[in-house]
Amino acid sequence: MKIDFWHDRWQQDQTGFHQDEINPYLQSFWNNFNLARGSKVFVPLCGKSLDMLWLKQQGYQVVGNEVSPLAVEAFFRENSIEPEVKENPAFQCWSGKDIEILCGDFFDLTASDLAGISAVYDRASLIALPPAMRIQYAEHLYHIVPSEINILLVTLEYSQQQMDGPPFSVSHDELRELYQGKYSISQLASSDIIGQEPHFKSKGLNHLMENIYRLSDL
Ligand SMILES: C[S@@+](CC[C@H](N)C(=O)[O-])C[C@H]1O[C@@H](n2cnc3c(N)ncnc32)[C@H](O)[C@@H]1O
């Protein structure tokens, strides 16, 4: 999947993945992590997710990563945060009110960009990527975040024969393959949301599972 695909999606305002409300699983499960206020949370492939605002409101510092400058600009504008914008060789760094978004390619992030991160909130990153890239994504994420972190992961699973991605289906077995040996994986919740997704129903899906996982240091 080429980066241009995502630039085009944002250019054409095809952002059906964006949620106008805070993700309910984030609100339900985040406190289980017992993360000290002031800790830094990494939000990969963040789009203009309002979940970053919720994390900030809970007292955390947020570091997002997003390739689309349109998404990053929209996040700050729509939430009335005046950003400071700095250029570095790989990323344009937008920041304001304890939220920093590194605008650029996730695969260019290094461990030093994410020094001091204590947790990761990952919604809809894996499902944005085709299978081979998901393997690269999981490897790269593991190598750039510090050890001893928790990850809250929100993903989707459906019959890939019924629809092409994105969003791609990420099965429970695939998730285990991606992260086994790296993290201990526990499933926190699973619910069929096809009734709330008429668009996907009209594309032929008869179920669409939203799966929530906690990944912890082994
Ligand atoms: C399915 S959306 C999810 C957005 C967000 N996590 C949310 O919950 O609304 C995937 C996002 O990843 C971004 N993206 C795709 N490939 C990327 C990459 N290689 N590096 C950084 N961002 C990327 C896209 O522009 C898009 O905003």
Image (spheres, helix red, strand yellow):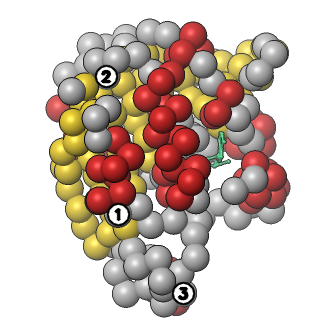
Name the secondary structure under disc 1.
Answer: loop
Judge depth for marks 3 and 2 and give the one in front. 2
From this view, report whether residue 138 is shown above or below residue 93.
Answer: below
Name the secondary structure under disc 2.
Answer: loop
Q: Amino acid at mark 1?
A: Ser
Q: Which residue bears the numbered disc 2?
A: 149
From this view, report whether residue 196 is shown above or below residue 35.
Answer: below
Judge depth for marks 2 and 1 and give the one in front. 1
From this view, report whether residue 114 is shown above or below residue 20.
Answer: above
Label 1 Cα crowd, 10 Å radius (few <14 / some 14-19 / many 20+): some
| Horizontal side of residue 181 vs 22, given as left or right | left
Q: Which residue bears the numbered disc 1?
A: 171
The residue depicted at 36 percent of the width and 57 percent of the height is 174
The residue depicted at 39 percent of the width and 74 percent of the height is 158
Circles 2 and 1: CB atoms closer than 8 Å: no
Q: Cβ(mark 3) to ligand 1 < 8 Å?
A: no
Q: CA distance from mark 3 to mark 1?
A: 19 Å
* Image position, residue 164 (x, y; %): 58, 76
Tell me where residue 146 sits by quadrant.
Answer: top left
Label 3 Cα crowd, 10 Å radius (few <14 / some 14-19 / many 20+): few
* Image position, residue 166 (x, y; %): 59, 66
| Horizontal side of residue 198 vs 74, given as left or right | left
* Image position, residue 110 (x, y; %): 60, 19
Q: Which residue bears the numbered disc 3?
A: 203
Q: CA distance from mark 2 to mark 1?
A: 23 Å
